[in-house]
Amino acid sequence: MSRDIAFLERLLDAPGPSGFEVRAARVWREEAESFASHVRADVSGNSFATVNPDGTPRVMLAGHIDEIGLQITHVDEQGFLFVDEIGGWDPQVLVGQRVLVLGREGDVPGVIGKKAIHLMQPEEREKASKTRQLWVDVGAKDRDAVAALGLRVGDPIVIAQGMVRLDGGLIASRAIDDRIGAFVVLEALRILASGSTPPAAAATAVATVQEEIGFQGGGARTSAWAIQPDVAIVVDVTFSTDVPDIEKKELGEHELGGGPVLSRGSAAHDGVFELLASVADEEGIPYSIQASPKATRTDADGIHLTRAGVPTGLVSVPNRYMHSPNEIVDVEDLFRAAQLIAAFIRRLDPETDFTPR
């Protein structure tokens, strides 16, 4: 099925590493304003869009809009930029990449450098690269030239990698995790807004910030505190197991094109899971199930214990090559996830209660 993914491409290509999400968030809000009844941002940078604000119950849909990146920690006298990680990187995938440094006077292109293999001792060649051994070269001849480009310590950096379309309805991007979650929750809201009758529930989609570095819940916790939802659905990515050298006994079986993945356990409320699963069955939406016996390592961990507790579901999209410059998902899985979430919300009414009995 052919899908219009122009908005998705704009969203994925907009730079927005954790703590510096403003440009991606602006793209998200501009799209939301085309159909949502109320769109806003908060002081942390979270973006909100609501449909049927006076409805009951209150539903929060969360997908984090930040991506992993790098940050300048030092500029040496020769004009080389040394960096630390924003979020979790495998430094091996950084070597030789082209990057964009997000400076105050505009984006500055650069490349990630390291010692050439010819100059390494044999024992050095066997060792994995570490981020502290890498640097960014923007072509500046010295520290003053770097300053003249409008760059300084603390500036964020992203991989210079735009979205690409692959065969079979797949796409690759540096920002799949979890820009696609922010996309899905807004698409679910779009489906609700385009319906002939509004849902009983008030539905608020949130493009949350700082998930990749928010070990105490990041923007998900603060936005859940503000919304006071009666139920929440988090959308994130999970590991696709349809590639070589993946241990399915640990992760389960989740493949691109297989539909959304529903989590059970930990922050994922079992009542919410059961309703999601029954709605998927009724709607004919394929899905798989993932066990989450410990932390989910998603926004769900920050939401489900907010205030007196929020019954929270976790809907994930299978993703290949997570935390790399070329993560891959199936576009159809994104729209299936949005369809599932919208249908879930339409099953809710003022009498819905997820309290275990």
Image (spheres, helix red, strand yellow):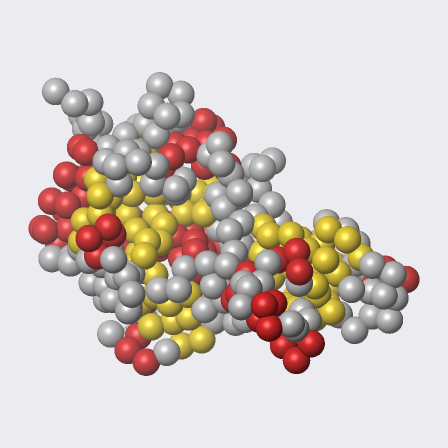
Q: Residue 255: give x, y in percent of width and height.
A: 23, 63
Q: Residue 63: give x, y in percent of width and height.
A: 41, 47
Name which quarter of the figure residue 327 lies in: bottom left
How many callouts does the rendering have? 0
Q: Is residue 30 above or below residue 224?
A: below
Quadrant containing the C terminus is top left
**Position of residue 115 in the picture relative to residue 3 (left or right):** right
Q: Residue 221: give x, y in percent of width and height.
A: 46, 32
Whether residue 352 appears in this view of the structure is yes
Whether residue 175 appears in this view of the structure is no
**Position of residue 40 in the picture relative to residue 56 (left or right):** right
Question: Residue extending furthest right?
Answer: 144
Nearer-the-camera pick, 209 or 215: 215
**Position of residue 331 in the picture relative to residue 18 (left or right):** left
Nearer-the-camera pick, 94 or 281: 94
Name which quarter of the figure residue 42 lies in: top right
